[in-house]
Amino acid sequence: MDARQARCRHFLSLLDLSAREARGLLARATELKGMLKAGEEYRPFPNRTLAMIFEKSSTRTRVSFEVGMVQLGGHALFLSARDTQLGRGEPIEDSARVLSRMVDAVMIRTFDHAIVERFAAHSQVPVINGLTDRLHPCQLLADVQTYLEHRGDIRGRRVTWIGDGNNMCHSFMEAAQLFDFELRVACPEGFEPDADLHAAVAGRCSILHDPLQAAEGADLIVTDVWASMGQEEEQARRETLFAPFQVNDAVMSRAAKDALFMHCLPAHRGEEVTASVIDGTQSVVWEEAENRLHAQKALLEFLLLPQA
């Protein structure tokens, strides 16, 4: 490992940040958001390039990272699995060694979390987890930023996750540890989140099988699609099992009066959430989606600029 690789920091999980770093990063995200809306030009990345590797399709992840790099004065390079040797059997380690000698950072959106870990282990530049089957940390930066902007500090609040114990649920579990809030997970039996991860955050996370009970007094209600990419063949079965876990007006009525609703999108109205909720006054999903841009700009700045 050379000196450049040894100094390199990656963002594969929320827990790659300290609590202080995470809070500072989100404060910076809101500051960058204000600068952009005020028309202030800020381009610290001239001639810097972000390689974006996509094995999973994307709308928000691709657009937010690509636009973010352009706004910061840099360039983003889109690479799909079918366009690279990585998709033709080249060892991940070799792809990491080559690409990291040509670009300044790499964002990977893929299935197996081990892929981003192996890539980062052999990269000379920062590697960002744009989503894996285990975690979605960039989305959580945007989610917590959105809560902070609407309701203030999330420390000590109650967050309720309703649905599958999937990658988003896992990242909310890590967020509960990092930002010090209570998390309630409501899921059908057999769809609980990873047991080891739950054990690591057991003091802040409880798993229930009743969405109404889980929503009681919640400050934030969050859900996701019932079948993620790669699970399409399970759609019909999941619709039956997850039907009692729809976020609807009855669920929201159990939460605190000023509770917010979030969804990482895309959403299926009439399945995991009703139109009355996602399009209602408690929903902040559109600003949540926008904040992917601002949070990731702050993340890129954190990883690529020298820290004081």
Image (cartoon, rainbow, N blue to C red):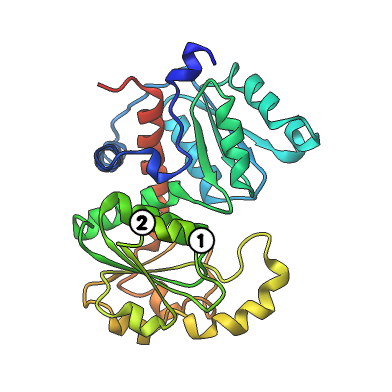
Q: Are marks 1 and 2 in contact (CB under 8 Å)?
A: no
Residue at 30%, 72% (x, y): give it.
282
Classify residue 263 as left or right of residue 84: left
Q: Amino acid at mark 2?
A: Glu
Q: Is residue 145 above or below residue 68?
A: below
Q: Which residue is mark 1?
A: 194
Camera-side residue of 185 and 86 = 185
Query: Which percent across, then down, holds residue 267?
Result: 52, 68
Query: Which percent across, then down, holds residue 215?
Result: 33, 78
Determine if residue 53 is in view: yes
Q: Is residue 160 above or below residue 6?
A: below
Query: Which percent across, then down, holds residue 60?
Result: 51, 50
Residue 101: image quadrant is top right
Q: Which residue is mark 2?
A: 287
- Under circle 1, the secondary element is loop
- Mark 2 is surrounded, within 10 Å at the Cα level, by few (under 14), some (14 to 19) or many (20 or more) other residues, namely some
